[in-house]
Image (cartoon, rainbow, N blue to C red):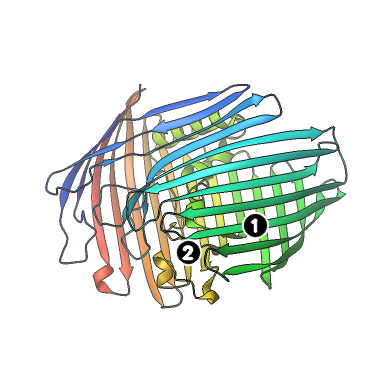
Amino acid sequence: MTVTHTYTDNVSLAPRGATLSDSVTQLIPGIAVATSGPRLRFNARYAPEFLYYQKLDPQETVFHRGHATGTLELAQDLFFVEAGAQVDQYEISLRGPIYGGSNINVAGNRATTRTSYLNPYLVHEFGSGARAEARLRLSTMRADDPAIADNDAGRVNLRLESGPAPTRLLWDLAYESETIDYEAGQESRSQGFTAGGRLRIIPTVGLLARAGEERYESAIAGSEVKGSLWSVGFEWTPTSRTRLAATAGKRFDDDAYTLEFRHRTRLTAWNVAYSEDVTSARSELFLPGTGDTAGALDALFSNRYPDPVERQKAVQEFIARTGLPASLAAPVNFFSQQLFLQKRWIALAGIQGVRNTLAASAFSETRQILFSSLGIPASGDFAFSETIRLSGGGVSWGWRITPRLAWNLSLSYTRNEFLDTGQTDDYYTTRAGITRHFRPHLSGSLSYRRQKRAAAEELNSYVENAYIAALQMNF
């Protein structure tokens, strides 16, 4: 159970001259369940937020937040069922105020979404020479804002790859097909086939190659984008803690690249990646966050906690004990119904010492709608610019002053650019606080938050200062 009391001088994130201060009390009861067995793995957390305002009387004062994932092995080494669900709040548009993960502010740019998926799949090994996998994924997304179209999707993944037998050549064949049906009647379909391989030159170095065909279309006649893709590159894996892989090739008659670098030591973890993918806003909701503190710290805890469930629990307990923020600077996933080509750089770093912990992130992401040349009406922020770039970074520092007292400081910066119109918004966030553990299961904290939006139009700019006191008890 967490109880917080926040005083903010700009509860509605309004421009200068229209600000309103308020005091907000927040009650957050939570429950977490995790299990890891030979046939079942399950992890769930639910923590609704109840808000009480001293001055305002907002329409929504209860926010449901939680997630659950599980995998069940129905037939040994053959048939599995994976399922998951999540409910949380997200910004609707980049053109409105950005909440930064807090539900305290009332500014009309927030939607609660509920996602769920069911993923039965079959796995079969043909001796030690080959392995086959077939997956069917059914997913749904529902939102409480009429501007966001509810949708359902079905995806089929088929994969045949080399088996566990040691060999110089590893290969795979993959087929993927997905249909997304939106409530408004719009539909998008994608289909792709790829073949890839890795040729080991020496034990630590391999050559990479991939080629294939892909096709994307909507329900509107003639709206089809298709073409071939190919790439070549290399992989270097000197130890189990270090990997570097890079490829270059062609996609949609344009240059295409990928990069992945991971390195881990006893006290540090580093991750840099570049990728190019055709995706959608609803698909991004089903992916793990790319800029959360837990992700930056996960690799640091892998030596002590090899089991993913135990490691996740240890990371969450560490974040709560040090008072570090749950998220780092990351791109905001604004809503639209379009498929888009996403080019993303992301870098994460984690450093842990005896008393100090540092987590940092940096990113640059460009989204461009896929059917821009076909005259299909765009939705969401793509209606204002067919190409949008998001970039920024942040750092969080936790200092364990004593076994029961910890200090934390985080700074972040984000820039959102609508490249077709020239509109640019800059966001600055500063958080600082101190956490005290009074008893093994009782802790309290005092913190300060400042967020600023500097927009081209003064009407869209704002500054907020907030002071937060919190008390948390674990049972």
- The amino acid sitting under disc 1 is Gln
How far across and how far down the image is residue 193, in percent?
A: 72, 56
Mark-to-mark CA distance, 2 and 1: 30 Å
Residue at the spot of label 1: 191
Numbered mark located on residue 410 in the image? none
Residue 267 at least partly seen? yes
Residue at the spot of label 2: 391
Front-most of residues 247 and 90: 90
Q: Quadrant of residue 308?
A: top right
Q: Secondary structure at mark 1?
A: strand
Question: Quick one: quadrant of the C terminus?
Answer: top left
Q: Residue drawn at (28%, 74%), measured in percent from left and top? A: 457
The furthest residue to the front? 221
Near mark 2 (Cα within 10 A), the count class, few <14, some 14-19 or many ≥20, is many
Q: Nearer the viewer, mark 2 or mark 1?
A: 1
How far across and how far down the image is residue 136, in percent?
A: 61, 41
How far across and how far down the image is residue 375, in percent?
A: 50, 75
Looking at marks 2 and 1 on the same chain, the residue that comes earlier in the sequence is marked by 1
Q: Are marks 2 and 1 in contact (CB under 8 Å)?
A: no
Q: Residue drawn at (40%, 64%), measured in percent from left and top? A: 380
Front-most of residues 123 and 9: 123
Q: Residue drawn at (82%, 39%), measured in percent from left and top? A: 130
Q: Secondary structure at mark 2?
A: strand
Q: Is 143 positioned to the left or the right of 180 in the image?
A: left
How far across and how far down the image is residue 359, in percent?
A: 49, 47
